[in-house]
Image: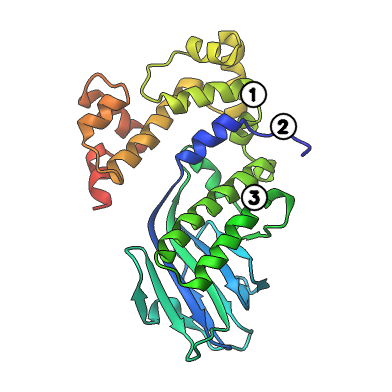
């Protein structure tokens, strides 16, 4: 690559914070003629993997993209789209098909009267939370086609091959294995996109590529509850306090302690909304001396009190 790769330790830490919530996967068997419509779902992402056969992806703006076995598609913004056998195939909303539950998060859709399906694909829709990388989501393209043979995604070839095998053999527990493998594929997609610069449009990615700044960011993400000072973060970076503060501000666009405060509140929102952690426990883990102090900081940064975040995902 022409550019310095992001810090491996920091990228690992950030990807560990990636969460896929509200996941609903479908294993779909099709006939020779098929058309599945997927509605727009802002705030969510779609993932499709074609295990066998051929298909076409029709995007919201009318672009037709041929698909072959082994292709994976990622739509990080949840845009409306269709998966069809041909442009003239009849199309039906995916939610209108009868399903058979395979597990808590995976169901089967059979749109074929034949015992030998024309195509098999694995489809998922989920809330897409990148944790510390969440600010990059608006920069992601509407559609990401995954060619596992490309240099960027070489590691995906065995994973996609395993997905194809699981989708076709019908072994016990195949639905759960497919869901886990799909999680790994999406993490690899994000990593590959970040490594290639995210269209070189993100200040955060610039910081990831700056070894000294990335060490300070890694320290913040590993110990978000520590009462960091600028001098301590500068020491993590191996820079003087003034040089570090200036470089951080110029690269990220905000001051180091402002970044630390926003990071704490992103973590707090996750713990409150999805992990259902008590407010006092969140405050303690994030280094606040009292629940009141935490609540004031949370409302100042997020615009809502922490109790609202605990209620919104019930």
Q: Which sits in the foreground, 236 or 38? A: 236
User: Which residue is disc 3 drawn over?
Assistant: 155
Q: Is residue 90 above or below residue 287?
A: below
Question: Are circles 2 and 1 on residues that touch, CB within 8 Å?
Answer: yes
Q: Is residue 131 left or right of residue 89?
A: left
Q: Where in the figure is residue 248, as x and y percent of width and height?
A: 58, 22
> Would you call the spot at circle 3 few (<14 residues within 10 Å), some (14-19), or many (20 or more)?
some
Q: What residue sits 49% from the left and 42% below the top?
A: 134
First in residue order: circle 2 vs circle 1: 2
Q: Is residue 249 visible?
A: no
Instruction: Give me the C-alpha separation between circle 3 and circle 1.
Output: 25 Å
Q: Secondary structure at mark 2?
A: loop
Q: Quadrant of the N terminus?
A: top right
> Which residue is label 1 attached to?
211
- Residue found 47% across the figure and 91% down from its top: 113
Which dot, 3 or 2, sits closer to the camera? 3
């Amino acid at each position: 690559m022409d550019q310095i790769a992001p810090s491996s330790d920091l990228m690992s830490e950030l990807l560990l914070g990636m969460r896929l919530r509200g996941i609903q996967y479908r294993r779909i068997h099709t006939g020779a003629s098929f058309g599945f419509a997927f509605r727009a779902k802002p705030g969510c992402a779609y993932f499709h993997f074609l295990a066998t056969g051929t298909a076409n992806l029709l995007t919201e703006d009318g672009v037709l993209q041929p698909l072959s076995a082994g292709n994976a598609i990622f739509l990080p913004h949840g845009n409306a789209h269709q998966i069809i056998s041909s442009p003239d195939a009849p199309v039906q909303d995916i939610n209108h098909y009868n399903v058979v539950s395979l597990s808590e998060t995976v169901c089967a859709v059979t749109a074929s009267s034949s015992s030998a399906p024309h195509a098999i694909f694995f489809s998922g829709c989920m809330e897409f939370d990148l944790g510390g990388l969440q600010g990059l989501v608006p920069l992601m393209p509407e559609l990401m086609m995954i060619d596992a043979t490309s240099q960027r995604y070489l590691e995906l070839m065995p994973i996609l091959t395993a997905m194809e095998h699981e989708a076709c053999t019908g072994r016990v527990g195949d639905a759960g294995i497919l869901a886990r493998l799909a999680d790994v594929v999406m993490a690899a997609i994000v990593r590959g996109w970040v490594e290639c610069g995210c269209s070189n449009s993100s200040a955060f990615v610039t910081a990831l590529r700056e070894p000294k700044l990335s060490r300070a960011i890694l320290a913040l993400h590993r110990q978000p509850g520590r009462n960091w000072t600028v001098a301590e973060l500068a020491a993590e970076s191996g820079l003087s306090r003034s040089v570090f503060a200036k470089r951080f501000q110029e690269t990220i666009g905000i001051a180091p302690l402002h970044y630390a405060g926003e990071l704490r509140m992103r973590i707090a929102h996750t713990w409150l909304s999805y992990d259902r952690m008590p407010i006092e426990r969140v405050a303690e883990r994030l280094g606040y001396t009292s629940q009141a102090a935490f609540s004031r900081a949370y409302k100042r940064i997020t615009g809502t009190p922490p109790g609202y975040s605990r209620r919104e995902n019930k």
